Image: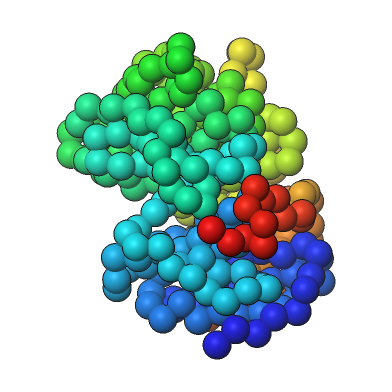
Amino acid sequence: MVTWVVAAAVSAVLAGTEVVFVDTSVGRAVGRVELGASGIAVFAAPDSRAIVPLADVDATALVSLTGEPRRWPGRYFPLFFDEMDRMHVVLPGAVATLTYPERLTIAKAEVPRLTGARRAAVSADGRVVVVIPDEAGSPSLVVLITGPSGGVGRVELPAVARAVAVSPAGDWFVGGLVDGSLALVAPGLSRPVANLVVGSTVLALGVTGEYRGLLAAVEGARGPELVEVRVDPKGKTGLREHRRTPMSVQPLAIGMAGSDALVVTVEGLLILNRLGPKRRFEVAIPGASGVAVLPGRARSAVPAWSE
């Protein structure tokens, strides 16, 4: 079943076997789409569709506010960037660039010993892809610089990464580690340039609307917290804590909608004003697990989103 109301600032929240569309400007659910199976994660496509790889079947659902659900065969965990007609996809042993929505291979970079990915992130221009590899051995990040002059490297970490975030320009990236620290890395380096302890474990990361801002969801000494961090990869400290916001429920995922922080908990979606302690809205969505901020203006190279 599909129900919808067209809204201006919409995010897609994954909750079990459905996607709930939320107008974050007013804090109200404006549509729900049944997936027919449990979703693993949710991603925002340039044409304002939400893409959800499914757990129960080998397929990927594509849903929107204004159209019927569709499915691709196979599971896709897309990394979208400024090019509206392509996406990066992490595969066993490679990172591929595919056309969107046709899924034709444009390029493929071999990544030795990459069996899968726990998490991955990409810069806004698509040039830098950072992957948390799903493998045993020493903790590390896999870094791919795309294009003719690119290459593949690894960054050794002091602990296993649970989350990763890449700056829009790709000039720095941060791993959120299970030991409660953030590891700042610049492309081309094999080790972090700075570390900052922010809690007992890092739960999720998000790049804020500011050029060098990072938001970390952590388990702190007094319970779950959101920690805003300033990033300066060429500065003396590299990472500097700016502000903390206590949370009553453990955050599961973070999204950024302009200057608002979208925080997913098992109870639903919290919308926080300008990363400060003031809570703008709370939308009850039991079983929520992920959020994707949809583009304010849909972009598509395919008329009517049709293949």
Residue 124 lies in what quarter of the image? top right
Q: Residue at x 51, y 66 (%)?
A: 62
Visible in this render: residue 230? no
From the viewer's perspective, tell me whether residue 158 is left or right of residue 19: left
Furthest residue in direction bottom, as rendered: 1
In the foreground, 57 or 198: 57
Q: How many marks?
A: 0
From the viewer's perspective, tell me whether residue 146 is left or right of residue 210: left
Q: Position of residue 24 (x, y in %)?
A: 75, 66
From the viewer's perspective, tell me whether residue 295 is left or right of residue 141: right
Q: Residue at x 46, y 23 (%)?
A: 146
Q: Position of residue 44 (x, y in %)?
A: 58, 55
In the foreground, 188 or 271: 188
Q: Residue at x 53, y 58 (%)?
A: 307
Residue 71 lies in what quarter of the image? bottom left
Relative height, residue 143 to residue 6 (above, below): above
Visible in this render: residue 153? yes
Q: Residue at x 68, y 35 (%)?
A: 213
Relative height, residue 194 to residue 165 (above, below): above
Q: Position of residue 4 (x, y in %)?
A: 70, 80
From the viewer's perspective, tell me whether residue 238 is left or right of residue 109: right
Q: How is the image coloured?
A: rainbow
Residue 208 lies in what quarter of the image? top right
In the foreground, 64 or 259: 64
Q: Position of residue 223 (x, y in %)?
A: 51, 59
The N terminus - image quarter: bottom right
In the foreground, 199 or 300: 300
